[in-house]
Image: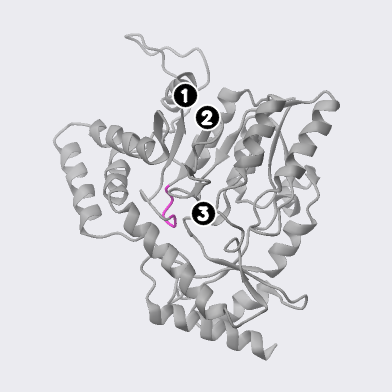
């Protein structure tokens, strides 16, 4: 099948990114390693998030994995997280041997229900379980409700790790995404708002956490003249060329954010007269979303999201159902879930719509026209 004419989310790369990548390659051809690009990118992301430290890594998954190790996730411990998320969140927990406990969403924005998560924590603690961390996910560029989660978890002595893979540039009550709790992680995958064509970042105010993660990411090599290792390490470093591209993208972050937000506003304007369509999260307050992917929920019990995706695909438009909840995934069939019904309903009735920052007005109009025409025909 040919690629869709209107893609869901493509990278917005221009001459600045191409020049940065070429310059980085030239440095390597000269027999050097451009560590300056990595250090610059780390400083830039730390500044955007307001965190003291940042370590550039090969993926957001790697960042989650290393942070969880430092926080004590291991066999016999539990990690609370969102059921509605990409598999990387749950996989990173399982890498450590810890047990993921999936928590249901809230209707307003599909993010984890903070009260349900804290209640689940109380029940687990009452059972004598050790909770290594809670990992709420910022879905589609909207922060989880940290005004409830952060103090509630602190009161219970549970570390908070923000899965901000999708929310760079977003904010909650004026605080940047990724800056809550013990640490935050970002993804710079090719489809993200800011891309390094593959990469991630761990941010924190905890110097020991970041130093440990940096060590683990370089095969846990000790600081001695020979190769010595006292703990298991990983090859999780970001490449210097990826960092160079990231620096060029970071200089354009306000532009990239404005474009994605304008796209969601465009969809909202078009769907204002379609009562069955709700823009996910738009009416939930705060307004600090980065609008990575504009998502809708169709308030019609007969709506079939999978059929809608197929119909749009036939029109050359790439749409996608919301994340399939982790508790429905065969690989996590044995995991504990708290609630789950709301996440299941969102999966059945929710869609991600094309949201690339390069999406044109005419393309957006076409998406809306084709979708509303299909809805009217049902």
Packing grade of label 2 (10 A; few <14, some 14-19, many >=20) is many
Dot 3 and dot 1 residues touching (CB under 8 Å): no
In the rendered image, residue 248, in percent from the top left (x then y), is placed at: 26, 49
Q: Specify the color scheme.
A: one colour
The residue identified by callout 2 is 66
Residue displayed at 69% across by 69% down? 349
Q: Nearer the viewer, mark 2 or mark 3?
A: 3
Q: Secondary structure at mark 1?
A: helix
Helix, strand or loop status at disc 3 = helix
Left or right placement of residue 246 versus residue 81 in this view = left
Q: Which span of residues is magenta-colored?
A: 188-192
Number of marks: 3
- Name the image quarter holding residue 28: top left
Q: Is residue 278 above or below residue 44?
A: below
Pick the front one: 277 or 31? 277
Q: Residues within 10 Å of mark 1 (few under 14, many from 20)?
A: many
Residue drawn where x is 50% and y is 74% of the image: 267
Q: Position of residue 74 (x, y in %)?
A: 67, 25
- Marks 1 and 2, how far apart at CA: 7 Å
Q: Residues within 10 Å of mark 3 (few under 14, many from 20)?
A: many
Mark 2 vs mark 3: which is more N-terminal?
A: 2
Q: Position of residue 26 (x, y in %)?
A: 16, 42
Label 1 close to label 2 by CB (< 8 Å): yes
For label 3, the residue is: 141
Q: Give the residue at mark 1.
A: 216
């Amino acid at each position: 099948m040919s690629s869709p004419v209107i893609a869901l989310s493509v990278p917005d790369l221009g001459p600045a990114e191409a020049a940065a990548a070429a310059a980085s390659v030239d440095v390597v051809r000269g027999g050097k390693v451009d560590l300056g690009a990595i250090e610059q990118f780390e400083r830039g992301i730390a500044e955007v998030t307001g965190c003291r430290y940042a370590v550039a890594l090969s993926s957001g998954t790697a960042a989650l994995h290393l942070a969880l190790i430092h926080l004590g996730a291991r066999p016999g411990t539990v990690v609370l997280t969102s059921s509605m998320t990409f598999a990387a969140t749950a996989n990173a927990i399982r890498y450590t041997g810890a047990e993921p406990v999936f928590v249901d969403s809230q209707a307003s924005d599909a993010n984890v229900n903070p009260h349900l998560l804290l209640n689940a924590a109380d029940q687990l603690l009452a059972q004598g379980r050790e909770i290594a961390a809670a990992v709420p996910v910022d879905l589609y560029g909207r922060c989880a409700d940290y005004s409830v989660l952060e103090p509630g978890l602190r009161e219970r002595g549970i570390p908070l790790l923000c899965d901000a893979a999708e929310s760079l540039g977003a904010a909650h009550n004026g605080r940047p995404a990724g800056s809550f709790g013990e640490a935050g992680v970002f993804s710079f995958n090719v489809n993200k708002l800011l891309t390094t064509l593959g990469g991630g970042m761990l941010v924190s105010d905890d110097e020991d956490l970041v130093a440990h993660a940096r060590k683990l990411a370089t095969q846990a090599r000790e600081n001695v003249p020979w190769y010595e290792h006292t703990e298991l390490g990983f090859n999780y470093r970001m490449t210097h060329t990826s960092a160079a591209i990231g620096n060029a993208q970071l200089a354009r972050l306000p532009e990239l954010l404005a474009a994605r937000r304008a796209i969601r506003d465009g969809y909202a304007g078009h769907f204002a007269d379609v009562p069955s369509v709700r823009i996910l999260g738009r009416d939930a307050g705060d307004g600090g979303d980065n609008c990575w992917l504009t998502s809708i929920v169709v308030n019609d019990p007969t709506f079939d999201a999978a059929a809608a995706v197929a119909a749009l695909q036939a029109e050359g438009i790439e749409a996608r159902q919301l994340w399939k909840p982790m508790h429905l995934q065969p690989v996590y069939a044995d995991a504990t879930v708290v609630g789950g019904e709301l996440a299941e309903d969102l999966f059945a009735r929710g869609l991600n719509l094309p949201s690339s920052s390069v999406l044109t007005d005419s393309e957006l109009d076409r998406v809306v026209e084709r979708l509303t025409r299909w809805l009217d025909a049902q």
